[in-house]
Amino acid sequence: MDFKEILKLIEVIDKSTLTKFSFKEGDTKIKIEKNMEETMCTKSVIKNEILEIKDEVERIESDNFEYIKSPLIGTFYNSPSPEEEPYIAVGDEVSKNQVIGIIEVMKVMNEVKCNYDGIVEDILINNNDTVEYGQSLIKIKVL
């Protein structure tokens, strides 16, 4: 099984309701597990008072934010080498296809590119952090 097939497999499992998956082919073994947590709305009792859930919810206006997500599992680097400046910083203007970081997978460096023209609102990970497939890395305010 090649690397692209593994990525496709991860993507399909991520979108499915499966919580566990195992695969073996020759010497290759793959085991994937994911957490499926359910969120429930209930009434809470605090100091003998019942807090009720309001029927009206304030509408929050979209600030037009998007997230750059990790295309791979690996180690994130914010610059081409430890001696060089980071690719981006909070407040920087970025353009589509601009390199914003590198993810190292099995000693192979993979560029992570921006999908939007915008301004870096927040950097959600640190240099040398291990990242997961689909994990949000950068918050961008789209222009």
Image (cartoon, grey):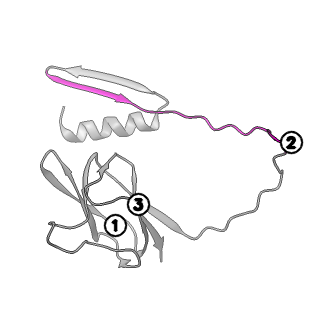
Circle 2 residue: 50
Element under label 1? loop
Mark closer to the chain start, 1 or 2: 2
- Examine the rendered structure and indicate whether residue 12 appears above or below residue 104: above
User: Is residue 6 rendered to the left or right of residue 68?
Assistant: left
Residue 95 at what x, y percent from top left? 34, 75
Mark closer to the chain start, 1 or 3: 1
In three-dimensional space, the C-alpha distance between marks 3 and 2, rounded to whole angstroms, equals: 37 Å
Return the residue nearer the eye: 117 or 128: 128
Kindly identify which numbered label has been placed on residue 22: none
User: Is residue 22 rendered to the left or right of residue 65?
Assistant: left
- Examine the rendered structure and indicate whether residue 1 appears above or below residue 96: above
- Examine the rendered structure and indicate whether residue 68 appears above or below residue 3: below
| Residue type indicated by callout 1 | Cys
In three-dimensional space, the C-alpha distance between marks 1 and 3, rounded to whole angstroms, equals: 14 Å
> Which residues, given as a range, are shown in magenta?
27-51
Kindly identify which numbered label has been placed on residue 124: 3
Mark closer to the chain start, 3 or 2: 2
**For discs 1 and 3, the disc positioned in front in the rendered view:** 3
Q: In which quarter of the image is residue 128?
A: bottom left
Asked if the magenta segment contains residue 99, the reply would be no
Circle 1 residue: 114
The residue at 30%/69% (across/down) is 97
Q: Quadrant of residue 100?
A: bottom left
